[in-house]
Amino acid sequence: MSTPSAQVANAALPVRPNTSKFKPVRLLQTPSVFLLLLWMIVPLAMTLYFSVIRYNLMMPDVTGFVGLDNYAFLFNDPAFWPSILNTLLLIGSVLVISVVTGTLLAVLFDQPFFGRGIARLLVIGPFFVMPTVAALIWKNMILHPVYGLLAWAMRLAGLEPIDWLAEYPMLSVIMIVAWQWIPFAFLILLTALQSLDLEQKEAAQLDGAGPIRVFWYVVLPHLKRAITVVIMIETIFLLSIFAEIFTTTAGGPGTATTNLAYLVYSIGLQQFDIGIASAGGIIAVVLANIVSFFLVRMMAKNLKGANEK
Amino acid sequence: MSAKNKNRLWLGLVAWACAIVLFFPIFWVAITAFKTEHQAYVPTLIFWPTLESFHEVMARSNYMNFVGNSLIVSLGSTILSLLIAVPAAYSMAFFPTARTQKLLLWMLSTKMMPAVGVLIPIYLLAKNTGLLDTVTGLTIIYTLINLPIAVWMAFTYFNDVPKEILEAARIDGANAWQEMVYLLLPTSMPGLVSTALLLIILSWNEAFWSINLTSVNGAPLTVFIASYSNPEGLFWAKLSAASLLAIAPIMVLGWLAQKQLVRGLTFGAVK
């Protein structure tokens, strides 16, 4: 798979080329390469194979090659297209929320203020919370329509509490996932920001640029590369978001929060239809490639600029 | 107060407000864990702290099993990935060829495969080999998914070691073993430790494979907490105590290693 981070990494990689004589020390790479090759090829080949045969654990007698029938069946599943949309919606929203909030927070935390070190620890805290814990805290203690903190706060303000997970299920899931990923974007972007030359900023200020212009013309271009990295890494993880949905809504109500990962799980491990679930897995791989293809094109220009410095 | 100082004060207040909002759910869990079930539903900060919920969670027959599984799986997979990755990174950093860069990028690209794309065959393989719901199975999976990160991180740290030192040692007659023990390990030890920390954090919190491949015997804490989903999730004090125990140690590790994590999480692209 050709990948966007490959491009980022390319620039970051200070490998010294060497005259290439065989040295036994290179054998040290063999286990890593072999294991990763195995990990990459075998399961994917199996998914591909299962996706074109009839294979249901509940009906072990029914077998045989079925061509693209599993795919056709999957496309006609009423949950399929919603799941694609949900996957993209979840990725898109969380990316936008986390990158925008993360950038603003990073700029804010780049200024000196009282107790900055401790405040910074608080902000990155949510990133270290395991997904099932995050999902349950939000579901039971914050979003709960009767006992949740939001319901309590809304009653205090004289408003009718909202049953978030029933009425706005996707929004709730997005909130939970974004809460976990804002700290990640913040941490990476703050680190990148702190490597910005103070002189550059001061020169711009001396030239009469206000804070907004400094942000737009000096800070943001400097952050481009780090933002690219954040977007790509988050995309990889967000494509397989599962635990948050599994513990809060189980994909519902209806198919409102079923993403592709959850759909494959429910067809394969709940309905035991290996063939159709595998077709779903292949679709996920294709989707990952499409997403990274567009990311690469979108980012290629930015990266070029950043690398030539 | 000068205008600049006033600005600074406001900036600080806004920043602190953001920090408190983001951290609040965690703070709330930490508070609720020390309440009784009755007090838990009252949004108050004034109460008499009790360890009751912790005792009850610990007493739940198998809680310690889940803790043990989490420890075994995350430490085991971290050690295994490092054992496989460090030699590879060593040879790539100090004896690079024209292909080394491509090889590293290829390793990175294996991380792009969405887990769900291989869920079905991995599940069946685990089932047929008896590795379903075992710590061994989960350890193997975590070792494999963390291997590229381990190679990359170790590689970038080795690359930071000045080559001149090694050359000087070689001229002084040090052999490869002495070079390794007296020079390389001491200089890159902090890097290797932070690599290990990142791997432990990632595997401790991993929840896709653990939920799908384990249920009871091999299940780590992520799965145990998921079991609080319904209707036990409404026992807030117990849920909070269990959650706090599951996240506190990792959060402390993460805080200690925050600077180094950036390098690991971005594959060395942001330092």
Image (tube, grey):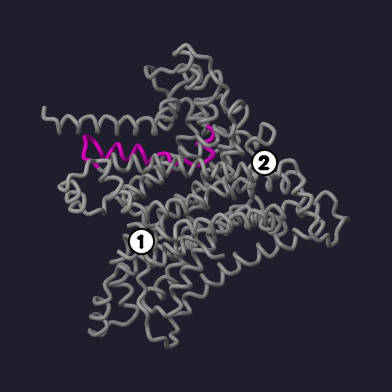
Crowdedness of circle 1 by 10 Å Cα count: few (<14), some, many (20+)?
few
Q: Which residues are magenta?
A: A111-136
Depth check: give the residue in front, A266 or B32.
A266
Q: Is residue B222 left or right of residue B44?
A: right
Residue lying at the far left in this picture: please name it.
B1
Nearer the observer: mark 1 or 2; the answer is: 1
The location of residue A275, given as percent across then percent down, is 77, 55
Depth check: give the residue in front, A87 or A237.
A87
Location of mark 1 (residue): A305
Name the residue located 26 percent from the left edge and 29 percent from the top edge. B13
Q: Examine the rendered structure and indicate whether residue A258 appears above or below residue A12.
A: above
Name the residue located 42 percent from the left edge and 44 percent from the top edge. A99
The location of residue A284, given as percent across then percent down, is 64, 53
Name the residue located 72 percent from the left edge and 55 percent from the top edge. A279
Q: Is residue A48 magenta?
A: no
Crowdedness of circle 2 by 10 Å Cα count: few (<14), some, many (20+)?
some
Name the residue located 24 percent from the left edge and 36 percent from the top edge. A115
The location of residue B56, given as percent across then percent down, is 52, 28
Could you say whether the residue bearing mark 2 is in a helix, strand or loop?
helix
Q: Chain of mark 1?
A: A
Residue lying at the far right in this picture: please name it.
A61
Location of mark 2 (residue): A82
